[in-house]
Image: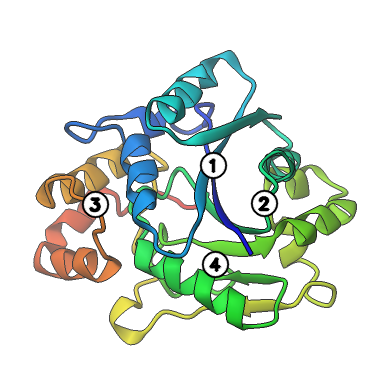
C-alpha cells in the first residue's frame, strides 16, 4: 500500500504568526522540514495540506519550488482538509506530520510506518502517552479510517484536531502507542515551534548541526545534555 506523508501547514498561528517561515540561516523551518522528509525510506510521497487563505500562497509557492505536492482547503476544518488531500492524491496509508515539528527524526517516522504495516491497528502514534520529546510527533492511519472518523467529529475541536475523533474512540478504532526507548525518553523537552523563544532554541540546534538533514533525536538529546544551559531559552513556553 502507498504511504503518503501529509504535512499540515498554515501561517495563521495565533501565538506566533508565520512561525514556520522564520529562517534558520539559509532555509526557513518549513523548507528544512519538507526537504528532510524526502530522506524517508518507507514513504512514497510527501504532500503539504494548507489552506485557501491568501497568506498561505507562500506555503503553496514553497511546496511548488521544492517539487512537493500540495492541496489547499479549509483553514479551520483541518480534518476535512486532510481527508480531501487524501482523496485528491488517492492516499492509502497516511503518516501525519505537523509543520511546527521541524526537527522530527525521520528514523522514528520510518520505524512507525513499518510497525503500522506489520501490526493490525487503525491508528498508531507516539502522542497519546508522551515519552519522546515534544516535536517528534507522528501519527499513522489509513484514509479509510480518517473518513470513518468524520462521522464522530461533532464539535469544533474534533474538526480542528485531525485525529481527535480517532483518539477519543478507542473502542471503535484500535490504537497502538509507541513508547520511546530509554535513550530517547525525554517527554518534557520542547522541540516544537510555538513561540519566539522556540525559534531561537531550534535555530541554535540546527545551526550547530549546520542545517544538515537526517539529524536524529539521539543526536539532539546528546547535544542538549552537553549544552543544558540552552534549555533555559524556551523552558517557560507553555505547550498545548
The spot of residue 58 in percent (x, y) is 45, 20
Please report whichever mark, 1 or 3, sits nearer to the chain's N-terminal start: 1
Of residues 30 and 158, the one drawn nearer to the viewer in this rendering: 30
Residue 149 vertical placement versus 73 (above, below): below
User: Disc 4 to disc 3, how far (Cα)?
Assistant: 24 Å
Residue 177, visible in the rendered structure: no
| Label disc, if present, on residue 47 of the rendered structure | 1
Residue at the bottom extreme, as displayed: 182
Residue at x-position 68% and y-position 58%: 92
Image marks 1 and 2: residues in contact by CB distance under 8 Å: yes
Q: Which residue is mark 4?
A: 127
Please report whichever mark, 1 or 2, sits nearer to the chain's N-terminal start: 1
Residue at x-position 41% and y-position 79%: 180
Residue 19 vertical placement versus 197 (above, below): above
Q: Which residue is mark 3?
A: 213
The spot of residue 113 in percent (x, y) is 52, 69
Q: Quadrant of the N terminus?
A: bottom right
User: Disc 2 to disc 3, how far (Cα)?
Assistant: 26 Å
Dot 3 alpha-carbon crowd within 10 angstroms: few under 14, some 14 to 19, many 20 or more: some
| Label disc, if present, on residue 91 of the rendered structure | 2
Residue at the top extreme, as displayed: 54
User: Disc 4 to disc 2, how far (Cα)?
Assistant: 22 Å
Amino acid at each position: 500500500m502507498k504511504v503518503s506523508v501529509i504535512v499540515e501547514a498554515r501561517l495563521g498561528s495565533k501565538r506566533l504568526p508565520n512561525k514556520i517561515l522564520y529562517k534558520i540561516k539559509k532555509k526557513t523551518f518549513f523548507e528544512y522540514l519538507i526537504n528532510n522528509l524526502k530522506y524517508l525510506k518507507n514513504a512514497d510521497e510527501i504532500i503539504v495540506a494548507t489552506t485557501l487563505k491568501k497568506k498561505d500562497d507562500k506555503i503553496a509557492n514553497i511546496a511548488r519550488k521544492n517539487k512537493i505536492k500540495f492541496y489547499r482547503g479549509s483553514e479551520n476544518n483541518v480534518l476535512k482538509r486532510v481527508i480531501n488531500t487524501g482523496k485528491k492524491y488517492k492516499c492509502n496509508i497516511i503518516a501525519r506530520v505537523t509543520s511546527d515539528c521541524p526537527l522530527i527524526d525521520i528514523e522514528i517516522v520510518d520505524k512507525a510506518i513499518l510497525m503500522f504495516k506489520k501490526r493490525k491497528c487503525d491508528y498508531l502514534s507516539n502522542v497519546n502517552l508522551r515519552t519522546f520529546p515534544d516535536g517528534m510527533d507522528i501519527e499513522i492511519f489509513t484514509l479509510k479510517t480518517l473518513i470513518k472518523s468524520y462521522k464522530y467529529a461533532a464539535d469544533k475541536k474534533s474538526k480542528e484536531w485531525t485525529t481527535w475523533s480517532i483518539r477519543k474512540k478507542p473502542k471503535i478504532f484500535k490504537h497502538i502507542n509507541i513508547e520511546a526507548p530509554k535513550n530517547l525518553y525525554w517527554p518534557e523537552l520542547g522541540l516544537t515551534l510555538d513561540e519566539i523563544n522556540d525559534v531561537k532554541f531550534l535555530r541554535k540546534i540546527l545551526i550547530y548541526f549546520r542545517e544538515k538533514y537526517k539529524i536524529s533525536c539521539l543526536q539532539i538529546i546528546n547535544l542538549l545534555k552537553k549544552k543544558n544551559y540552552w534549555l533555559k531559552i524556551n523552558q517557560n513556553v507553555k505547550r498545548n
